[in-house]
Image (cartoon, helix red, strand yellow):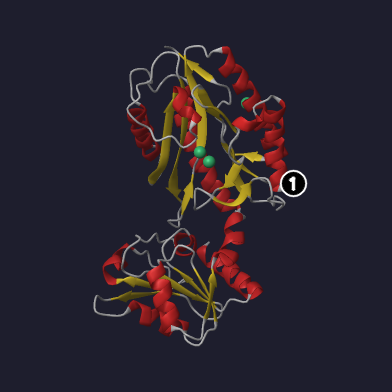
Amino acid sequence: MLAERAARVRARMAEVGVDVLLVSVGPDLPYLTGYTAMPLERLTMLVLPRDGDATLVVPQLEAPRVVDRPDVFALRPWGETEDPVAIVADLVGPAREVAIGDRTWARFVLDLQAALPAARFTRSAPVTGPLRAVKDAAEVAALRRAAEAVDRIAADLQAGKIPLVGRTEADLSADIGRRIVDEGHQHVNFAIVAAGAHAASPHHEPGERVIGPGDGVLCDFGGTMLDDDGVGYCSDITRCVHVGEPPAEVAEAYAVLHEAQRAAAAAAVVGTPCEQVDRAARRIIEDAGYGDRFIHRTGHGIGVEEHEDPYIVAGNATPLAPGHAFSIEPGIYVPGRFGLRLEDIVVAADAGPDELNRADHRLAVVDA
Ligand code: ZN
Ligand code: ZN
Ligand code: ZN
């Protein structure tokens, strides 16, 4: 798996004229090595030459956490009195075109530039971005496992099996977080819980607001689940639950949102430009008079990172390719009143849109 991935990266490096890829903290590192580094002041760096073997340079005290992958990289632990920048510079050698990970601390970028005055530094995104955006069958399977896990939590919320009334947003958020881990994720990425008018803020921070009868509750949550290589893949789902029957204005807006979300999912076929998928949802919301209440893009790519290419947004003419995985999450937000969002992860496939999340799309009503 990882060895094939490294081969694809080398082919891509040849295409874009990169001699050496340097990857520090951030999602590219587990994607290529299965190892997730802590963002420490000590340098961790994968040195991956286009021709030649890769080396993973890690602080000696972190080395026990690295699973040896001799088919992918040699491990080079560095001791506390060694200079890791000099070690990396040595491994880069006379290479001229160096692509460096977007998340690398500036201090290391600057030190490496000083240590390699003849090298030209560019960003790693053009090398790894297009590869990461297109998921192979094993990656789709990993995303599906993560999606099924959060679907089960969503189903419990919708069925009233997770109590809402009398709890604070923060308490419900913590509960959802525990369930994300119990369902097999390695960690929680977020668990937004927004009650009543709070839901009009798309990224509301769950607080001390107590959920009560008559509240709509927007829950948007996800985590990272590890595959067999130790590479994490993300889940992300949004469902809305109403405590007691919703008022007409909420029910009407939800019907529009539901139709828009379904239309965008149906539009997510191979070859369709990303912006057309956004258009499919937005047109319906605009036609119903809520155009100015839909204040964000329709979706984002998802994989080893919660948000990555391709973005489902006006201006992105990239045609969907088989293996593109992304969210479809239109929303309608009426400040001071209510907020609604409906989100699934969908994969573009030759057989048509592959919807990874299957939790019921209706506005669930639970007892007050
Ligand atoms: Zn989400
Ligand atoms: Zn999302
Ligand atoms: Zn539906």
Which percent across, then down, holds residue 277?
69, 41
Between residue 296 and residue 87, name the one nearer to us.
296
Is the distance from the Cβ of mark 1 to the nearest ligand 2 atom less than 8 Å?
no
Can residue 351 be seen from the camera position used here? no
Which percent across, then down, holds residue 130?
62, 60
Between residue 110 and residue 75, name the one nearer to us.
110
Between residue 74 and residue 80, name the one nearer to us.
80
Query: Is residue 251 shown left or right of residue 194?
Result: right
Can residue 80 be seen from the camera position used here? yes
Write down the quadrant of residue 243 in the picture: top left
Q: Image height check: is 215 above or below 141?
A: above
Q: Which residue is mark 1?
A: 272
For the C terminus, which image quadrant? top left
Q: Image height check: is 101 above or below 208?
A: below
Callout 1: few (<14), some (14-19), or many (20+) C-alpha neighbours within 10 Å? some
Which percent across, then down, holds residue 316?
68, 51
Query: Is residue 128 shown left or right of residue 282?
Result: left
Q: Circle 1 sits in a helix, a strand or a loop, which is it? A: loop
User: Which amino acid type is marked by label 1?
Assistant: Thr
Residue occupying the far right of the picture: 271
Identify the residue shown where x is 68% and y is 25%: 289
Q: Image height check: is 152 above or below 275?
A: above
Identify the residue shown where x is 53% and y is 51%: 303
